[in-house]
Structures are given as structure tokens and as C-alpha cells.
Amino acid sequence: MTSEVRIVPRGTSDTVDGARRNGVRVDSTRDAPVGRSVAIAGEGLTIEVAPHRCFACGALNEHGIHLELHVDGDRCWTELALPERFQGWDGIAHGGVICTILDEVMAWSLAATDNWGLTARMAVEFKRPVQLGVPIRGEGWVSATRRRLVDTAGRIVDPATGDVLATATATYVAAGAERKRELQARYRFRLTSNDGRAATGDTAAGANPG
């Protein structure tokens, strides 16, 4: 069975309107508690987080990339075409933005095991320049787990040709139980089934992130 993650801005009308003004596509087809983002839909489960300011996926960051992320098993992927504001050399995406996309898809691949992780180390190899305005696909997956250390790999590909544009490996440190609870409260995290029933406790009282 395929599971899918979508990070989609949700929340109050002010939050949604602001996200739309910033060019973020808003999905209002599913009900969610006020002030939350429907973030991850898995195999019968959904992770919800509050709108936040992450440069990679946060709906409230007007300067961000606004990635829409999906999960298939232990793989996370995203597809997009980078606009000119992420330019490095003329017509080419900045390498730091490519690193950010790779970090994001590898980090979210940990969601398959309900892990929250921080990047410990990351290595990137740039194979070919990433052209602005041309669709690309970022993919990340878990390659090994060693206690609290999770090894991942990722790549950026041209979905039209299959050419590999960049590859990466990274190690993430999974949050301990207490820190994970803090993060869940801060981001108003909860895990629900697709019929809306909570599979974990509601932590909506946490502070707004970012």
C-alpha cells in the first residue's frame, strides 16, 4: 500500500489568505482543526502540524521554497520547478537551495518510523547544474538505523529524462522521548486516522512554531 505525505497550509482564514498571497497553493478539501496544517497522510494515519516558517516547507515563510512533500513507504519525494529568486549563476539554481531540498526529503523520510530528527552530517555531490524553471524531483529514503542514528540517502533527478542531477547522504539524530514531546507540542502535532479519530493525544495547547 502506498502512503502519501502532503504538507499543505491550513488554519485560520488569515493564515490561509496570507499563504495564498504568498503564492502558496492551499488545499481546503479536508477538514482540520483551526490553526493546524494537514501535513502527512499515511497508511490510514495523518500527521497534523501547525502552519510554520520552515524555509523549505513552511507555508508562513514568504521567502521559502514551499515544498509539497509526499511519502511512499520509507521514501519521501517532492516535485517542483525553482523560480528565479533561487538563482546562483545565471539560469542555474543556487547549490544551497539544492542542499536544502535534499535535506528536507531525507529528513521527512524518517516519518515512516515516526521519528523526528536533526541533521548531524550531510554530504552532497553535484552531478549536473539544476536549471531554473525546469521541473525536478527530489527523493530521500532511509538506508540504515543504528539506535538513535538514522542514515539516509537522497537525490535530485530530472523527471523527464531520469538524469541524476545531485546525490546526497546524511545522518540524523532521532529526538529522545522528552524532546519529541516538546516538538509535538510546539508544532501542535497529532496523529489521526483517515476517519478523523486521534491515534495520539491532542497537543493543540502547544505554542505556535516559528
Image: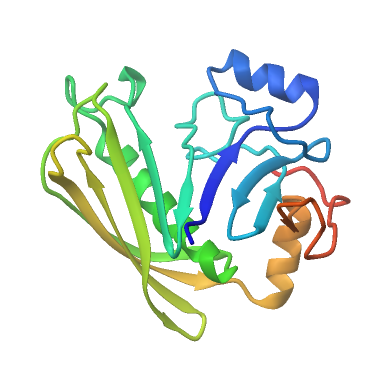
Identified at 51% across, 50% down, the residue is 4
Residue plotted at (68% across, 37% down): 51
In the figure, is residue 153 to the left or right of 142? left
Q: Nearer the viewer, residue 149 or 108?
A: 108
Residue 201 to residue 99: above or below? below
Q: Quadrant of residue 60?
A: top right
So how many labels did they put on this image?
0
Q: Position of residue 87 (x, y in %)?
A: 27, 24
Q: Is residue 56 left or right of residue 158?
A: right
Across and down, in percent, residue 204 comes to 85, 50
Establish if 117 lies above or below 49: below
Q: Is residue 85 visible?
A: yes
Residue 16 drawn above or below residue 126:
above
In this view, the residue farthest toward the front is 1
Residue at image location 68% in from the left, 27% down from the top? 28
For the point 47% across and 54% down, which residue is it? 71
> Which quarter of the rendering shows the C terminus?
top right
